[in-house]
């Protein structure tokens, strides 16, 4: 897959996840802007890996090896359980969602590296860092504005 296609798809996942997360953030939900952006980007990374593996096999003229895709699927599942371990519920407040999403995305970057997709891994890591810095800064500003307007901050309300 050309890097331009990879970056376009990854950027679209970032945009869509951010839009969804912005709505959640505005409504004061536990999984807000950065969490939704990270999950969307992470899911995109895993799909792009599997698509790249299939396309590589097709272009090489050989059979598609589903074993790589099975391993990838098990990484996604296993890291999901690991991420669940960092989520803590304290009354009506939930902590650790962003950390869990970041761990999941990091697994995607690790898989990219494992499959030799260096440029894609660097691009993915850069986007994840931007989410955790730029979007997190924006998220904090929104939380502070909610508190100033008499809100109680971000609480789990679903």
Image (cartoon, grey):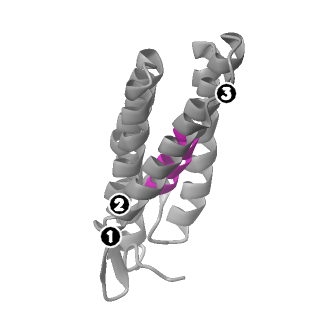
Structural crowding at the residue carrying mark 1, measured as other residues with C-alpha within 10 Å and reported as few (<14), some (14–19) or many (≥20): some
**Disc 3 vs disc 2: which is toward the camera?**
3
- Residue tagged by mark 3? 64
- Say whether marks 1 and 2 touch (CB < 8 Å): yes
**Point 46% across, 20% down: residue:** 117
Kindly identify which residue carries mark 1.
87
Which quadrant of the rendered structure holds the N terminus? top right
* Distance in Å between CA atoms under marks 3 and 2: 31 Å
Q: 30 above or below 112?
A: below
Residue projecting furthest to the front: 63
Q: Is residue 130 visible?
A: no
Q: Which range is magenta?
A: 35-46
- Give the residue number, with chain letter if any, for mark 2: 83
Residue sitting at 32 percent across and 89 percent down?
91
Q: Residue at x 60, y 34 (%)?
A: 50
38 sits to left or right of 22 = left
Q: Is residue 66 above or below residue 55?
A: below
Cα–Cα span, label 1 and label 3: 37 Å
Q: Is 38 covered by the magenta stretch?
A: yes
Q: Is residue 45 visible?
A: yes
Q: Main secondary structure of the magenta part?
A: helix
Give 18 or 97, whichever is nearer the viewer: 97
Q: Quick one: label 3 or label 2, which is nearer the N terminus?
A: 3
Mark 3 residue crowding within 10 angstroms, few (<14) / some (14–19) / many (20+): some
């Amino acid at each position: 897959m050309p890097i331009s296609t990879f970056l376009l798809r990854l950027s679209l996942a970032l945009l869509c996840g951010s839009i969804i997360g912005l709505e959640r953030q505005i409504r004061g939900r536990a999984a807000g802007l950065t969490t939704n952006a990270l999950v969307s980007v992470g899911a995109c990374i895993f799909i792009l890996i599997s698509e790249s593996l299939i396309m590589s096999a097709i272009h090489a003229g050989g059979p598609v090896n589903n074993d790589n895709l099975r391993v990838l699927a098990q990484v996604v599942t296993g890291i999901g359980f690991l991420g669940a371990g960092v989520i803590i519920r304290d009354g009506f407040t939930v902590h650790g969602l962003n950390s869990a999403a970041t761990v999941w995305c990091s697994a995607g970057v690790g898989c990219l590296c494992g499959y030799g997709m260096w440029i894609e891994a660097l691009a993915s890591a850069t986007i994840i860092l931007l989410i955790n810095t730029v979007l997190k800064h924006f998220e904090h500003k929104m939380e502070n504005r909610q508190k100033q307007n008499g809100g109680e901050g971000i609480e789990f309300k679903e």
